[in-house]
Every structure is written in structure tokens, then in C-alpha cells.
Image: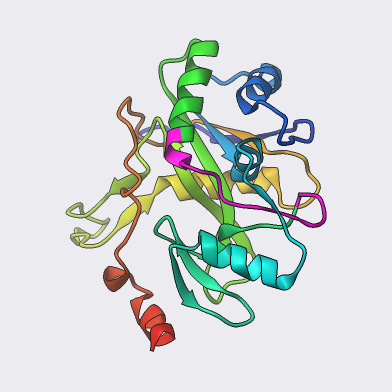
Amino acid sequence: MQKTEKILVQGIKSKIITQNDDLLAILQKTLKRFPPREKDVLVISSKVLAVTQGRVREINSKQDFADLVKNEADEIIGEGAVTLTLKNGIFIPWSGIDRSNIQKGLAVLWPEKPFESAQKICGFIKKKFKLKKLGVIISDSHCIPLRKGVIGLALGYAGFKGVRDLRGKKDIYGNILNFTQQNHADMLASAAHLVTGEADEQTPFAIIRNAPVDFTSSRSDPREMLMKKNEDLFAPLIDFKLK
């Protein structure tokens, strides 16, 4: 039996990051306390990326927020106590807009081009720390229908394959797997959220060591993890809301 190495998830604190900060400079300085190694995966909060991109907006009323959600959404799925939307192919409340961990009266949008940002950060960190294989994830939190609490979500990633396709392989009883695929990017984002937190932890970065993923030098395809609405397991719920 192949020996499995223990997976280490290390949260990394930083100063409060503002719109005036250079995220790459902060990463270079902050990671000196826990330098990344070969085949590590660096997880970065989408909020600090968005803030340093200037993706912060002033909110003075509920209507301001509602208008911002509609402007940011690619599609409105349903409206009520919560506005359900599609953004970048992801089913997410309020277009991913967040009003936590930001000054009162402000809201943070999702970062622009998260896959391109992950690729840029990955190249920068590999060069600075002289690494050949490294993964980077831009993470946010989201909810699963009918389950309490939030888990991690990869908005973008680079340096490794986000999905491992097990279709055609056999299970322990020899049954052929017809549908199973493992979403490694979201799994790792969730693991990182255990140590980065959601409140005042001030820990926007995490290093995951010995993650069992397939590293690659190819650019990640943003479509790799996406499902078409009519092929998704939750398609009946979406159809119901649209009727």
C-alpha cells in the first residue's frame, strides 16, 4: 500500500490589507515567516485580492446594495429575502458581494479575473522562492442548499488540476464509476477555511502541504469546474425558481 503523507494546513496572519496595498509585496514579506516549499498550495482570500484591485463600493441604502447585486450578476435566478444569482458560472447569493471585514458603509465585490490573478501570483511566488511546482487558490466562502454554515469555494486557481476525473475507474467492488469527479480546488479551499476563519482572525492566507493533487505548468481553464445548468443535479430547483 502506498504511504500517504500527512496533510498540513497552516494559516498565515497578516496586517489589515487595504486598497493602498500591493498584494504581491505583502505576500513576499508575509510568506518569509512560513516559506512555501515544492508542491505546496497557497490559498489566498478573495477579499484581499478584491480590495487591492479596488473592488470596493460605497453602500448607503438597501437599494444601493440591490442595484449593485443586479449590476454584478450575470443572471438573477430568484429574488426574495436573498437574491440568488449566477456569477462567473457559479451559483451564489448576492453576486458574491460581501459586507463583512470591511468598513461600515462599504461592500467588497468579487475580484476581477481570479484565474489570471492566481496565475500571476503563482509565477511571482515560484520565482521569489525558487520553486518549480506550486499551486495557488483564490478562495471565498459559500453555502450548500439545506446545510448550515459556509465552506470554501475556489474562484480561481493555478499550478494544479482543479478536477480529478474518476469516470471509467472501478470502486473497491469493481463497479465502474460513471459520474464521479473530485473537485480538488474547492476541497482545498474548504480545508484552508478551517484555519483562515470568517470573523476577526486576520488570517487571509494559508499554506497546504502534501496535498494529493496533480501539479501542472499549463494554464488552468476557468470552465474546468463548471456545470451547465440543465446538466446539474440541482437543475430542478433552478427551473422551479424560474417558473
Query: What residue is rendered at 79% in x and 57% in y?
Result: 105
Q: In the image, is residue 121 above or below residue 182?
A: above
The foreground one among 135 and 169 is 135
Splitting the image into 4 quarters, where does residue 58 fall?
bottom right
The residue lying toward the viewer, choosing from 167 and 71, is: 71
Q: Position of residue 45 (x, y in %)?
A: 62, 42
The color scheme shown is rainbow
Would you say residue 65 is visible in this rendering? yes
Residue 241 in picture, x, y percent from top left: 44, 84
Q: Quadrant of residue 142?
A: bottom right
**Residue that lies at the very extreme toward the bottom in this rendered image:** 243
Residue 112 belongs to the span the image colors magenta: yes
Q: Give residue 198's position: percent from left, percent from top.
A: 72, 52
Image quarter where the N terminus lies is: top left
| Quadrant position of residue 63 | bottom right
The residue shown at (72%, 38%) is 203
Residue at (77, 63) in percent of width and height: 60
Instruction: Specify start and end residues of the magenta stretch as a single range.
Output: 101-116
Question: For the stretch drawn in magenta, what is the main secondary structure?
Answer: loop
- Observer-nearest of 71 and 13: 71
Q: Is residue 4 visible?
A: no
Horizontal relation, residue 81 to residue 219: left or right: right
Residue at 49% in and 68% down: 85
Q: Say if the magenta span includes residue 164.
A: no
The x, y position of residue 226, in whole percent, is 34, 56
Q: Quadrant of the C terminus?
A: bottom left
